[in-house]
Amino acid sequence: MMRPRAPMLRVATMLGALALGTVVGACGPSVRTKVADAMAGCVAQRNALFKAGRAAEALAGKLPAAIDSLADQTAYRVGFVLYQQVAAAAETQTELTCALELGSHYDHEDVRAWLKTFERSPDAPVVAHAKRLYEAQLARLGRAVPATP
């Protein structure tokens, strides 16, 4: 019987595999390291509440400034691609919502389109979090949030 891997080991494994990609290889290890560190900090910050069934509470709080700073430092195309890949491989709500939040630091139409894809998630906390992040992007751009039908 296989033992489940710890969340951060999975993130580290995913990011290690990404090192072989040509997109990441061109940017050097600093982007990978910052994404891995930001993910590790976010998961450490929120995992206990998720495991206790308190997802809304986990997502209501702001991340520490150091984690936000790492996300800001990776807020461009390559960092966003890494967060997308981590989200696609996420095995827990914590990993997925952290990848969404950290990836959303990149203010770009592709990010907003990506966040909108989570409206169809069967996971209510993920839907609510993606919607909040999408609306925060629009607010930073000075755009009104579209009315929900």
Image: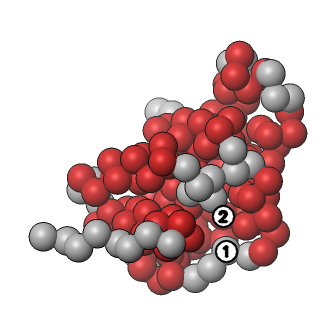
Instruction: In the rendered view, tell whether residue 2 sits above or below residue 145.
Output: above
- Left or right: 149 in relation to 39: left
- The reply to whether discs 2 and 1 touch (Cβ–Cβ < 8 Å) is yes
Q: Which element type, helix, strand or loop, lies under badge 1?
A: loop
Residue 32, located in which quarter of the rendered image? top right
Residue 3 location (% of width, % of height): 54, 40
Instruction: In the rendered view, tell whether residue 4 sits above or below residue 148.
Output: above
Query: For the point 59% across and 55% down, which residue is it?
Result: 107
- List the residue tagged with mark 1: 63
Direction front: furthest residue: 142
Residue 126 location (% of width, % of height): 38, 62
Direction left: furthest residue: 149
Q: Closest to the observer: 90 or 119?
A: 119
Query: For the point 63% across and 59% down, which residue is it?
Result: 105
Q: Amino acid at mark 1?
A: Leu
Residue 69, located in which quarter of the rendered image? bottom right
Query: For the point 58% across and 82% down, which residue is it?
Result: 61
Q: Which element type, helix, strand or loop, lies under badge 2?
A: helix
Q: Which label belongs to residue 82?
A: none
- List the residue tagged with mark 2: 42
